[in-house]
Amino acid sequence: MPKYRKKPVVVEAFQLTEELLEEKGWTEEYVGNQKIKYRLDHAIIQTLEGEMIANIGDYIITGIKGEIYPCKPDIFEQTYELVED
């Protein structure tokens, strides 16, 4: 079976923390045309596939086409590394 390597792609991302949720409160914001609803201990993200929950510690990624989606920290850390600006 053929093997493939993922192309290097730089994405923007931030980690959902308790401090961020306290700061945001019960607010909503748009990233592009997708909505993030911040709640007390999670965020609800309107993704291209429907609503997804991001829990404290999860990363919220903005993909190469501007789409946003949550990612568990262990998967994020295995897939991405920090790029200097």
Image: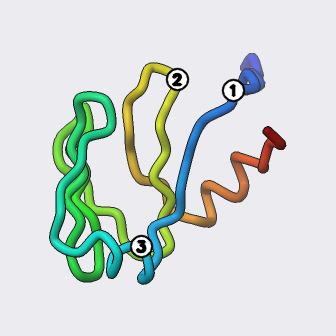
Q: Earlier in the sequence, mark 3 or mark 2?
A: 3
Q: Nearer the viewer, mark 1 or mark 3?
A: 3
Q: Is residue 11 left or right of residue 18?
A: right
The amino acid marked with disc number 3 is Leu
The amino acid marked with disc number 1 is Val
Q: Nearer the viewer, mark 3 or mark 2?
A: 3
Residue at figure coordinates x 16%, y 71% from the top left = 26
Which residue is denoted by mark 1 in the rendering? Answer: 9
Q: Which mark is residue 64?
A: 2
Numbered disc 2: secondary structure:
loop
Instruction: Give the residue furthest to the front.
Output: 23
Numbered disc 1: secondary structure:
loop
Which residue is denoted by mark 3 in the rendering? Answer: 20
Residue at figure coordinates x 76%, y 26% from the top left = 8
- Residue 51, position in %: x, y? 18, 49
The amino acid marked with disc number 2 is Ile
Residue at figure coordinates x 72%, y 55% from the top left = 78
On screen, residue 46 above or below 21:
above
